[in-house]
Amino acid sequence: MRDADPYERSAGPAAAALPSRLAGGPTALFVYGTLQFDAVLSGLIGRVPARIPAVASGWRAAALEGRVHPGLVEAAGAVASGFLLTGLSLREWVILDLFEDDQYDLREVALASGARGWAYVWPVGEVRNEDWDADEFAASHLQEYAARCARISARLAADASEIVP
């Protein structure tokens, strides 16, 4: 498992400005991987935001080489199931953005319902042929992963406070 501390994958502490990928003012967040789990969200932002089940057609939650979390990749004929998180504050967006691997692109994606949501999309590389298995993650990694998220949440919150007082 390469991603022992998710926060350490990023470029480091926050700068004093809003991260560029949040500059467009994203609204609802489509989550398809580890952020689907209450324990992960609670560990990172201290609550579970309002959410509705959602599906992104033409995408799949791909297993990534050496990582316990997935990457959302385009795939004709595939569907990625997850949730649309709504009601995130700007501070929570910043915390989640600081948490996410810098390799992800934050992009707006169309959902099967006709709604649109922002999602952390995996660009290229390290993508395995099989889809990420949420049940396997929950059984084998969730407890440890959520505990790590809770341990780094104070750093993330402190860095976010430099950006969004």
Image: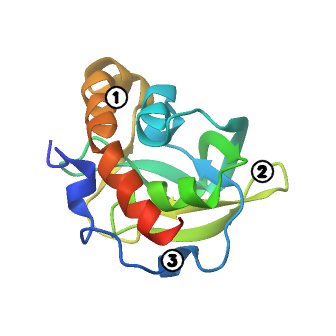
Mark 3 vs mark 2, CA separation in Å: 30 Å
- Which label sits in the foreground, 1 or 2? 1
Of callouts 1 and 3, the N-terminal one: 3
Identity of the residue drawn at 71% across and 42% down: 54
Expressed as whole percent of the image width and height from the top left, the position of residue 125 reads 28, 68
Frontmost residue, 155 versus 2: 155
Expressed as whole percent of the image width and height from the top left, the position of residue 30 reads 62, 51
- Which label sits in the foreground, 3 or 2? 3
In the rendered structure, which amino acid carries the disc numbered 1? Phe
Expressed as whole percent of the image width and height from the top left, the position of residue 6 reads 26, 50
- Which label sits in the foreground, 1 or 3? 3
Q: Is residue 134 above or below residue 29?
A: above
Expressed as whole percent of the image width and height from the top left, the position of residue 60 reads 52, 51
Label 1 close to label 3 by CB (< 8 Å):
no
Identity of the residue drawn at 34% across and 50% down: 129
Element class at badge 2: loop
Q: Quadrant of the N terminus?
A: top left
Q: Is residue 152 above or below residue 59?
A: above
From the viewer's perspective, tell me whether residue 139 is left or right of residue 121.
Answer: left
- What residue would you read off at disc 2? 112
- What residue would you read off at disc 3? 18
- What residue would you read off at disc 1? 137
Res. 82 mark: none
From the viewer's perspective, tell me whether residue 84 is left or right of residue 78.
Answer: right
In the rendered structure, which amino acid carries the disc numbered 2? Ala
